[in-house]
Image: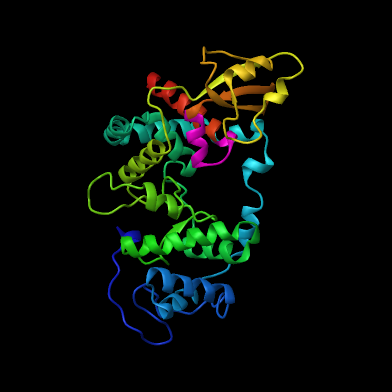
Amino acid sequence: MQVLRRWAARRVCGAGLVGLLGVAPAALAADYEGSPQVAEFVAEMTRDYGFAGEQLIGLFNEVERKQSILDAISRPAERVKQWKDYRPIFITDKRIANGVAFWREHEASLTRAEREYGVPAQFLVAIIGVETFYGGNTGSFRVMDALSTLGFDYPPRADFFRKELKQFLLLAREQQVDPLTLKGSYAGAMGLPQFMPSSFRAYAVDFDGDGHINIWSDPDDAIGSVASYFKRHGWQSGQQVVSAATISGGQADAGLSPGLDPMKTVGELRALGWASQEALRDDLPVTAFRLEAEAGPEYWLGLPNFYVITRYNRSAMYAMAVYQLSEALVKARSTK
């Protein structure tokens, strides 16, 4: 497995520092050479986690600051598109057909994951389909470049990405891989399921039992890891995800959730003019949201499993894309 090659013992030689972190004696990017932020980060990693300071400095000498990453993070689709434009990106004939093929090829692993974690196979396939088109687009940025660029040069979320950079270096040491070889998205998300480093360390599993976790090129580990993530975030086996709603009266919009957290109960929403298509308990907390669709506004109640999907990506549109792709996969598979 090329991307997960084992670290070898190395020595300092030539112009580069090599060793624990696998820094090769190549031409140095030096975008972060002398950076006070990097120096502070290196001191923290040395003090708190036992990394060798010189080797980390050598590693950061090869890291490149990417303006394209800073440009990309300022315009995610969930923020600039409405549902009528966002949905067609993910619910396509090709994505559905490839999803059915992925399901067929990895049916044994999907069935086992569903049995062990209680997460239906169609949701595992849909997550991987939405994230990377079933592994077809896992990202071309070096994770070190992405997390360093955002951790040191993107003030709005620098703390978050610096924490993820810390988790990434710990991950690389634990998995014994060269951190400069691992690639992912512009935000540092990795592999078929696009796990951030903290999610990898917390939820990824060695589902095929070969002794190491490879979500980059091993669909079995990716499938098991997504199922593990959902289970650990409270997925309720056998329960619905959403319920379509109709509204009446002048207070309906007062029921809309300000964020993704389930803020009101079904009963409270009913008093504001909301009616769900399915029978739901009055005391059930839900996320009430509206989507701007082609035919006009749609109103939905997000149930506990919907909230679990939003833990994967903090977006109601993302969760709906996963849900509707999963429904389309089941329908397409039944006709094959």
Residue drawn 48% across and 34% down? 308
The image position of residue 336, as x and y in percent, is: 37, 22
Q: Main secondary structure of the magenta part?
A: helix
Residue drawn 59% across and 16% down? 267
Can residue 142 be seen here? no
Stretch of the chain drawn in magenta: 305-318
Q: Quadrant of residue 34?
A: bottom right
- 25 to the left or right of 28: left
Can residue 71 be seen here? yes
- 223 to the left or right of 80: left
Q: Nearer the viewer, residue 113 or 288?
A: 288
Vertical order, 142 against 56 (above or below)? above
Residue pushed farthest right?
Answer: 250
The image position of residue 161, as x and y in percent, is: 54, 58
Vertical order, 175 against 33 (above or below)? above
Q: How many marks?
A: 0
Q: Is residue 259 magenta?
A: no
Vertical order, 262 against 18 (above or below)? above
Residue drawn 36% across and 48% down? 204
Q: Which color scheme did the rendering employ for the protein?
A: rainbow
Q: On the rendered image, what quadrant is the N terminus found in? A: bottom left
Residue pushed farthest bottom?
Answer: 14
Q: Nearer the viewer, residue 311 or 144?
A: 311
The image position of residue 40, as x and y in percent, is: 53, 74
- 27 to the left or right of 300: left
Vertical order, 283 against 200 (above or below)? above
The image position of residue 14, as x and y in percent, is: 39, 87
Q: Nearer the viewer, residue 187 or 285?
A: 285
